[in-house]
């Protein structure tokens, strides 16, 4: 995969802040014409650097105010279980991890009772032997990916 250059990184950072910016605005910010900015963004999409464009919604405003991270323990390798975890709609992210647990999932629900139901459904996944849930009381911040720059 072709590496992104500094102009691409600037465009990506601007799009992360507001993906609705016009190509003219993006181009002006990075010293390109609107057409050149559009072409760069198109190529970033084609190469899979930009995977999707989404809206940042306040979870509490749409009834998903309970956030939990759940460590899922297993008796078998869970690397082929992505589809089973994806089948639980309240799971926003699922990661195979190293350590005492096998999978880490990020869950959003409206109530702790609904979270308890999600935990029950996790136990129905083949190989799951236990869970340890941590409920988030407050989120200080969440950084966009370009805030975490390698060697920078």
Image (cartoon, grey):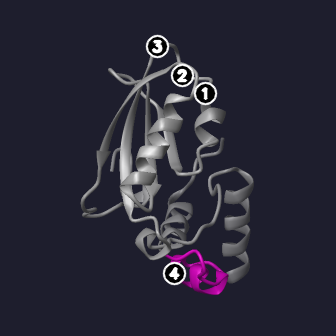
In whole angstroms, how far apart are the C-alphas of marks 1 and 4? Answer: 43 Å
Residue under numbered circle 2: 78
Query: So how many labels did they put on this image?
Result: 4
In whole angstroms, how far apart are the C-alphas of marks 2 and 4? Answer: 45 Å
Could you say whether the residue bearing mark 3 is in a helix, strand or loop?
loop
Residue 120 appearing in the image: yes
Q: Earlier in the sequence, mark 2 or mark 4?
A: 4
User: Looking at the image, is mark 3 or mark 1 nearer the viewer?
Assistant: 3
Residue under numbered circle 3: 75
Could you say whether the residue bearing mark 1 is in a helix, strand or loop?
loop
Residue 148 appearing in the image: no
Q: Quadrant of residue 37?
A: bottom right
Image coordinates for residue 46, horizontal then vertical, percent: 75, 55
Residue name at image x 58 percent, y 74 percent: 19
**Residue 24 is one of the magenta-drawn residues:** yes
Image coordinates for residue 15, horizontal then vertical, percent: 54, 71
Q: Nearer the viewer, residue 10 or 20?
A: 20
In whole angstroms, how far apart are the C-alphas of marks 3 and 2? Answer: 9 Å
Tell me whether the residue at label 4 lies in contact with that at label 3, contact meaning CB atoms closer than 8 angstroms.
no
Residue name at image x 44 percent, y 62 percent: 110
Q: Nearer the viewer, residue 65 or 103?
A: 65
Q: Quadrant of residue 55?
A: bottom right
In whole angstroms, how far apart are the C-alphas of marks 2 and 1? Answer: 5 Å
Residue 41 lies left or right of residue 31; in this view the side is: right
Q: Earlier in the sequence, mark 3 or mark 1?
A: 3
User: Which dot marks residue 81?
Assistant: 1
Image coordinates for residue 109, horizontal then vertical, percent: 45, 57
User: Looking at the image, is mark 4 or mark 3 nearer the viewer?
Assistant: 3
User: Which dot marks residue 21?
Assistant: none
Query: What segment carries the magenta color?
Result: 18-33
Residue under numbered circle 4: 29
Could you say whether the residue bearing mark 4 is in a helix, strand or loop?
helix
């Amino acid at each position: 995969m072709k590496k992104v250059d500094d102009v691409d990184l600037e465009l990506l950072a601007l799009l992360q802040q507001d993906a609705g910016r016009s190509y003219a605005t993006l181009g002006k910010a990075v010293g390109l014409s609107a057409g050149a900015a559009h072409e760069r963004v198109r190529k970033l999409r084609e190469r899979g650097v930009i995977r999707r464009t989404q809206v940042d919604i306040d979870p509490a405003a749409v009834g998903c105010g309970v956030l939990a991270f759940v460590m899922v323990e297993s008796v078998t390798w869970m690397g082929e279980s992505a589809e089973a975890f994806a089948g639980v709609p309240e799971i926003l992210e699922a990661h195979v991890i190293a350590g005492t647990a096998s999978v880490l999932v990020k869950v959003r629900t409206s109530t702790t009772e609904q979270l308890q139901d999600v935990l029950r459904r996790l136990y129905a996944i083949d190989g799951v032997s236990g869970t340890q849930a941590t409920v988030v009381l407050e989120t200080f911040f969440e950084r966009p990916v370009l805030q975490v720059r390698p060697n920078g």
